[in-house]
Amino acid sequence: MKKEEELIRDLREMVKDTKAGKVNWKIIEQTTEYNDSVSKPIVDEDGTKWQVDECYVSFNCEYKGKEFLMKEGIVSGNQAELSGGGIFCTGSTHVEISGGYITNNRSDTTEYRGGGGGLFTNGQASIYLDGGYITGNYAESGGGGIRTFAERFAMTGGFINSNYANLSEGGGLSTNEYGIGTILGGYINNNVSNTH
């Protein structure tokens, strides 16, 4: 696991490379403007009712290395039309979460092999969860908190709580049939899957 000063150095280098045009960032914009009005929230403010349209903007890029490390911070209020409402990792990425919050994110795909309201991984990825909170996320498919098709999943700490999966399994956590999973600690509580 990289030390804090190494991460800061890497981030500064990425900013420098971005300014020099060496990093290609993707910008994804989504809006609820054209959604069915029945699904939009209504806000009542001083006797006036407003129908709320939401707009989401996310940024991503591929950069040196294949690690995603989260020690603190907040990933919240994001929405993906496909998988990984909060975080999407693919290929041979090693994901390590030891702190922070991944909360109130949403994945809208109905594909069976999609989902992951908070976090989605696939390929030869591996996930190690030692801390942090993955809470209050929603997946239209499976894995309200985490949906992983990674080769390895290990949990020794942290919280996967109050997540929701609508059309498939794993309100809190959904893993695949070929991966190796180990849970030695942490809490997986109060998650809901709407499947029968």
Image (cartoon, helix red, strand yellow):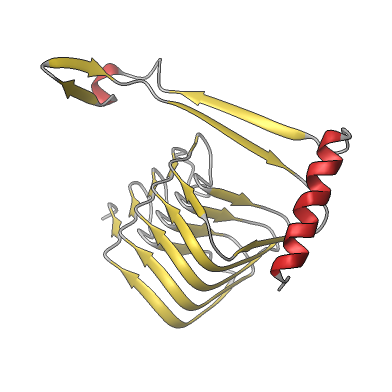
Left or right, 150 with respect to 7, comes to: left
Residue 39 shows up from this direction? yes
Question: Residue 23, located in which quarter of the rendered image?
Answer: top right
Q: Quadrant of the N terminus?
A: bottom right
Q: How many marks?
A: 0
Residue 35 x, y percent position in the rendering: 37, 19
Residue 172 x, y percent position in the rendering: 38, 62
On screen, residue 22 above or below 150:
above
Residue 104 x, y percent position in the rendering: 38, 47
Residue 92 shows up from this direction? no
* Farthest left residue in view: 47
On screen, residue 7 above or below 2:
above
Identified at 87% across, 32% down, the residue is 21
On screen, residue 122 above or below 36:
below
Q: Nearer the viewer, residue 107 or 2?
A: 2
Q: Nearer the viewer, residue 27 or 141?
A: 27
Q: Quadrant of the C terminus?
A: bottom left
Q: Nearer the viewer, residue 180 or 102?
A: 102
Residue 34 x, y percent position in the rendering: 40, 15
Left or right, 195 with respect to 29, comes to: left
Identified at 35% across, 46% down, the residue is 167
Identified at 72% across, 71% down, the residue is 3
Left or right, 68 with respect to 158, comes to: right
Left or right, 110 with respect to 181, comes to: left
Identified at 73% across, 58% down, the residue is 8
